[in-house]
Image (cartoon, coloured by chain):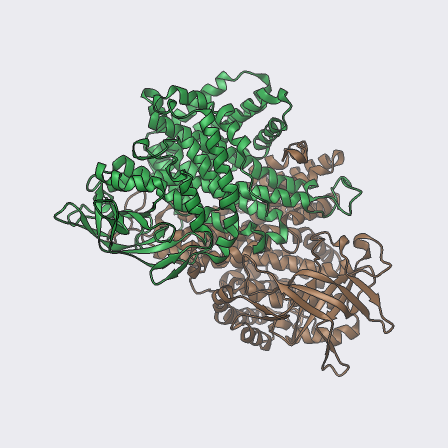
Chain colours: A brown, B green
Amino acid sequence: MADYQVPLKDMSFVLYDVLKIDKLWQKLPALAEHVDRETADAILQECAKIAEQEIAPLSRQGDEIGVSFDNGQVTTAPGYKAAFATYAQGGWTALGGDIEYGGMGMPKVITGLHEEMLCSGDISFALYPGLTAGAALSLAKHGSETLKQRYLTRLYAGDWTASMCLTESHAGTDLGMIRTKAIPNHDGSYNITGNKIFITAGEHDLTENIVHLVLAKLPDAPTGPKGISLFLVPKYKVNDDESLGAANHVSCGSIEHKMGIHASATCVINFDGAEGYLIGEVNKGLACMFTMMNFERIGVGIQGIGAGVRSYQNALEYAKDSIQGRALSGAKSPEKSADSIMVHGDVRRMLLNMKALNEGSRALSTYISMQLDMATYGEGEQQQQGESLAALMTPLAKAFFTDMGFDSAVAGQQVFGGHGFIREWGQEQLVRDVRIAQIYEGTNGVQAMDLLVRKVAGSKGQLMQIFLNEVKDYIADTSSTNMDEFIEPLKQAIGELSDLTTYLLSAAEGNIEELGAAANDYLHVFGYTAMAYIWAKMAEAALSKQASGDDFYISKIHTARYYFTRILPRRLSLIVSAKSGSDCLFNIDEDLF
Amino acid sequence: MADYQVPLKDMSFVLYDVLKIDKLWQKLPALAEHVDRETADAILQECAKIAEQEIAPLSRQGDEIGVSFDNGQVTTAPGYKAAFATYAQGGWTALGGDIEYGGMGMPKVITGLHEEMLCSGDISFALYPGLTAGAALSLAKHGSETLKQRYLTRLYAGDWTASMCLTESHAGTDLGMIRTKAIPNHDGSYNITGNKIFITAGEHDLTENIVHLVLAKLPDAPTGPKGISLFLVPKYKVNDDESLGAANHVSCGSIEHKMGIHASATCVINFDGAEGYLIGEVNKGLACMFTMMNFERIGVGIQGIGAGVRSYQNALEYAKDSIQGRALSGAKSPEKSADSIMVHGDVRRMLLNMKALNEGSRALSTYISMQLDMATYGEGEQQQQGESLAALMTPLAKAFFTDMGFDSAVAGQQVFGGHGFIREWGQEQLVRDVRIAQIYEGTNGVQAMDLLVRKVAGSKGQLMQIFLNEVKDYIADTSSTNMDEFIEPLKQAIGELSDLTTYLLSAAEGNIEELGAAANDYLHVFGYTAMAYIWAKMAEAALSKQASGDDFYISKIHTARYYFTRILPRRLSLIVSAKSGSDCLFNIDEDLF
């Protein structure tokens, strides 16, 4: 397996040449003071060192040894404890945190790229700080001052990690059905009792305490999702002097044996009258948890990108080194016994698919992070627009980047031929590790429904219109003739996305099931089109720097061309399918399947 | 995991209602005597029992325990030895064999469906008899009378198994580069020396002897593929009285640790001056091996179908049992706490994709088997046509059915949500097991090149024209108005496949690399179109039986409709991509990747 190399130059290109993020930072008072290009670059460079030198080397051993479970205790694979300590000591657990409680206050565009590096290094490792950062965000936004002083500071310090306890065995995605109970105590705390499954980082040995965010219901709560409250339940209680107190009634019942992410502990967590503290208001827990879930959904999307990038780097090295056969048009390396497999159109197709999708996903993901930053730190119309686009594009980020990342992991494995199936090469691990990203945090089918039903139809098309208008403005403002090859197909794609949206909203008036029937296709049409927008912007930035003679920009322009030529047409079939109606899905009785 | 149930009714439908295979058998003198519907049905029913009761139950344990290696010995997982003995005692190892040497002489349409059952049960198990049957075919066609009497009879009896020793570590797909040497001995035998990797079933404990078919080069052989000869090298030599003799100089150096098919031994096999016997003529070994490879390629395609079918059965059971959420259009089971996830359009989409692709693949695969049977047992024009279509469609079968099977395995896993990632459910194993089918026996990229470069362009379009003509004749002959919904899109698809073929052959005249650039897209356009042909035939057969009131036919018509509505449009994007030219792949320098 190739040594992982963080694509720092591409990250810098996306941030400054494409998104001109440094100008945005200057305009946002809440960021201008402590964030600038110099700081951001230093952070990304330091993070790259940790990802390349400390985290990436863990992944093979983490896969082979995995986490182990013995009598309620979870032991991580060799190296994880030391790597987490290094990571925490470097201050990375505080990266996106609220400055008031010890965080570094870095915007999402930076923390997102940092997440990509961790995920390319090892998704299993990335999950421990990833869950913690999401929980911290929810706590910072909804927690009481007492909870924040006591817990948030320690999460930022990397002393403790956090988990997210939603799923119960009988309920799955349907959180309205959860049975975990919260009984109020006289001192304002609650007694939490119930069993949660699939709890990532629910138990481990990386830190001495673990802070669980737990969804539960009060005895008199309304049925369904409106009766859910959110609680903070520590593994060990915390004394008033902030030292660790008695063990809480929280235990790990078992861990799952999984297809991948073997070094990540996926736990059954049992709460047996554990002491918990309300976060936010009673019965409003789902909204508080969604602060975390939206963060994690974008984070899971980034897992897809991380795996795709690693797969590409490995496959490219393998393809260049692999000497087999000859080019169709005759030997390219006649002095050797065979050509490298880089001469084959189909090998190039697989590699360029990966390259174009990875770079497009990174840029689009960072664009979505920028919307989140505008929502968090902006004001007025800019803040509104950021919030709208972040809401619209969160399900896209989760589902589209993981679908593309899985495809890239599989494609990279294919480039390896037989060796791609052998464990020691590490390539098949990427496929197994990233596969879960399409499933957890709401399956990609759930994301597609969230996008089309809740976000697009729920806003009567307004959220999508904001995106469409932005792209139409961009098209109108871009008049350079050397951009025609990108602008023309983008114009067509955006027009068709607009038409499809109108078509489906209208069809849904007659039959709401039309939305569910079209949701997956629609999400992908949106994804390919949004990616075309960001690829056009990348092409524009690269064209403006082409004269520098730097190969990076030449490569970028070629890759943009590849995207528009070979990938963007994928939306054509999807549009036909999305418009084909729900009859073919629903006119067949369940017994006839 | 659901208990595997062999879809016997669908197999019967394909054989008799769609392909009217019993009428073909009557017309082929070499088959008419010993093959009829009654015999075939009895065989399939008996085989179903073995697959369901003996083989399917092996797969979870086979995955968890796998094969083990100790000092040159390979031990299979518990149950495999007994299951193989049962399989052999049932005469299944003789199923497709030459009657003259103890085979049952069943046609490929029957042996292919038998293979599907084994693969749905457990791909790892299926590989042991699968490789043996392929080797036997090559031996029957190219071996000397002595070799056939001594070895073929024992392979058919299930006393021994066989392997296929092609790949060497430095050569991969490029067989012209192999280094294994064959030195002639005075007695007509050869001394074989060299190292082979990725040898499926190269060593195991299921039988007392193993017959290796080995590609090697004589000292004075021409360089490249034209200098390859094929040898039979037994693990133990065989005495003149047919008892086992001394160990040959063949050893297993190690086994691979793989993503999946853990119960299949993938071996490094070392030949150190082992005694071998020439099969066929000197330097014509590749042609003899291709008899086996073409058999195995179709067999690997069937692995894709087998995994897809198992995935569908499991996912359907899970979806029906899984109670979560409500239908968009309101509760369908208001008496329960939630609806089953079968109410969701996107879950139905995944299931119907699997159903339509599985049934389409089974029918198309059996159609291809029928071409092989006509090539083997037919005469004159019919024999010619069978040979042409089998040649054209072998790479399609290998690549298209494995791509669809992998997609179905992944889709089934997705239906399971989080449980799809957990090993004990068995669903993720299907993904890991079938993944190799896209890689071995020539990667699917190699198959795409074989199809477009060797078969289509190599025949100047003639092989494809034979297929196109058959479908055009079918369209012209089908005038019933209730077939319009299938015939119209089929007509369009076949016209576009014809146009695309002409377009690419013409483009290739200017630049041969256009073929490599378009090969993967072309293969899939061909696949979806050929599957539309077989789905139209299935719809026709089902419509003619609709009046029977049997739900099977109603389901079949719905599924046909689904295929034409939601799956066939996939070819639209692929055609655009295939026609987009090779520039975007080749105008980027290797260093710019």
| A192 relative to B210, above or below | below
Q: Can you say which quadrant of the picture contains the N terminus of chain A?
A: bottom left
Look at 75% across and 73% down and name the residue there: A148
Using the image as rendered, state which of residue A78 and residue A404 is in the foreground.
A78
Image coordinates for residue B249, horizontal then vertical, percent: 24, 56
Quick check: can you spot residue B530? no
Q: In which quarter of the image is residue A504?
A: top right
Using the image as rendered, state which of residue B335 and residue A553 is in the foreground.
B335
Image coordinates for residue B427, horizontal then vertical, percent: 56, 49
Q: Quadrant of residue A372?
A: bottom right
Using the image as rendered, state which of residue B522 and residue A374 is in the foreground.
B522
Total numbered labels placed on residues in the image: 0
Look at 52% across and 73% down and name the residue there: A79
| B110 relative to A111, above or below | above
In the picture as drawn, the residue positioned furthest to the left comes out as B186
Using the image as rendered, state which of residue A268 and residue A283 is in the foreground.
A268
Q: Can you say which quadrant of the picture contains the C terminus of chain A?
A: top right
Quick check: can you spot residue B42? yes
- Lateral position of residue A354 relative to residue A218, left or right: left
- Lateral position of residue B265 relative to residue B193, left or right: right
Image coordinates for residue B329, horizontal then vertical, percent: 76, 39
- Lateral position of residue B142 relative to residue B257, left or right: left
Look at 51% across and 23% down and name the residue there: B17
Image coordinates for residue A165, horizontal then vertical, percent: 70, 62
In the picture as drawn, the residue positioned furthest to the bottom comes out as A241
